Image (cartoon, rainbow, N blue to C red):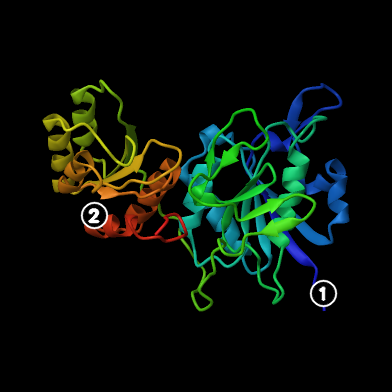
Amino acid sequence: MNLQRRILLIYTGGTIGMIKSPETGTLEPLDFDNVRQHVPELRELDYEIRSIQFRPPIDSSDMRPVHWARLVNIIAEWYNHFDGFVILHGTDTMAYTASALSFMLEGLQKPVVLTGSQLPIGVLRTDGKENLISAIELAAAQDEQGHAMVPEVCVYFGSTLLRGNRSTKASAERFDAFCSYNCPPLATVGININFNRKVILTPEADKPFAPHTELDNSVIAITLFPGIRPQVIEHVFEMPDLRGIVLRTYGSGNAPQQPWLLNAITGATESGKVVVNITQCDAGAVEMGLYETGNQLLKAGVVSGGDMTVECAVTKLMYLFGQGLEADDVRRLMTTPLAGELTT
């Protein structure tokens, strides 16, 4: 019996996939069909590694929902043929992609690990090799019963494995570029790989894998700040095709008690828009009943986003509206953990 684990490597684009051309000296995309030539350390791994490349590669700042759907289709097509999946992705929107996939890959029972690098894999001090090798090892890791150690969508960066929909890019320079402020790491990588089994999601054994590709991007995130013009809020909240609004408020979910703001929010919610309250703070959660300022938002029909990241709140709205749900159902599910994105 062949017990060799099979990993599918999906290169979407980003810094990690760049090498220096010996002819011109400029950086160009790596041919991942021959990845072992450029990362010979992979030969030491006793895994079967296949690859699929986006052609042309997508800069992560150009990543769109159509590319998330493409990733879902690839994983769905090869789901029964591989033990785990590693997605190589630019860092700028990696947390958005990881958050979206965590909802779109319903019933996931295999690892989907996103990683990238701050320096191209073809330069001397690259962090790309370690990130790639460790991401593959994490995607292949199994427990004593032969089940995947981390059967969820994750981000691996800088020796730390994070839940995808809890991650956010925190640094443009450090090798440990990603943080998860409200959820402990799923694993840390040093001399050994240490899994945090209490945090890792346990999939429902009898729940079938159900990939989704329909998203509705008629949503927006808006950040409050002192002096924001009422006309801006009113214009945004009255947009006829808008269905969901992520409102980034102060502290534990507070906002100015100004009639123009409360009237705009009330008008939006009464017209069927879903307004979700998340905090601008890196860590912590929205508690709208804690202060009167937050309580006013609750009365205006705003729902709490708890401790969700902005990347998660935006993509979760896209996903829920993409399922054809009515506003009341979306409001209910925004406060319900679907893929470990909320602390309860």
Q: Which mark is residue 2?
A: 1
Residue pictured at 52% horizontal, 46% vertical? 97
Mark 2 surroundings within 10 Å by alpha-carbon count, few (fewer than 14), some (14 through 19), many (20 or more): some
Q: CA distance from mark 1 to mark 2?
A: 50 Å
Residue 2 locus on image (x, y percent)? 82, 74
The relative height of residue 238 versus residue 105 in the rendered view (above or below) is above
Residue 39 locus on image (x, y percent)? 83, 44
Residue 79 locus on image (x, y percent)? 61, 65
> Along the line of sight, which residue is nearer the eye, 162 or 239?
162
The quadrant of the rendering that contains the N terminus is bottom right
The quadrant of the rendering that contains the C terminus is bottom left
Residue pictured at 54% horizontal, 50% vertical? 164
Image side of residue 31 versus residue 209, left or right? right
Residue pictured at 67% horizontal, 61% vertical? 84
Badge 2 amino acid: Ala
Residue 129's image quarter? top right
Residue 28's image quarter? top right
Image side of residue 258 versus residue 144, left or right? left
Dot 1: element: loop
Q: Do callouts 1 and 2 mark residues in contact (Cβ within 8 Å)?
A: no
Residue pictured at 80% horizontal, 46% vertical? 35
Badge 1 amino acid: Asn
Mark 1 surroundings within 10 Å by alpha-carbon count, few (fewer than 14), some (14 through 19), many (20 or more): few
Residue 290 locus on image (x, y percent)? 25, 46
Per the image, the residue denoted by label 2 is: 327
Residue 280 in view in this figure = yes
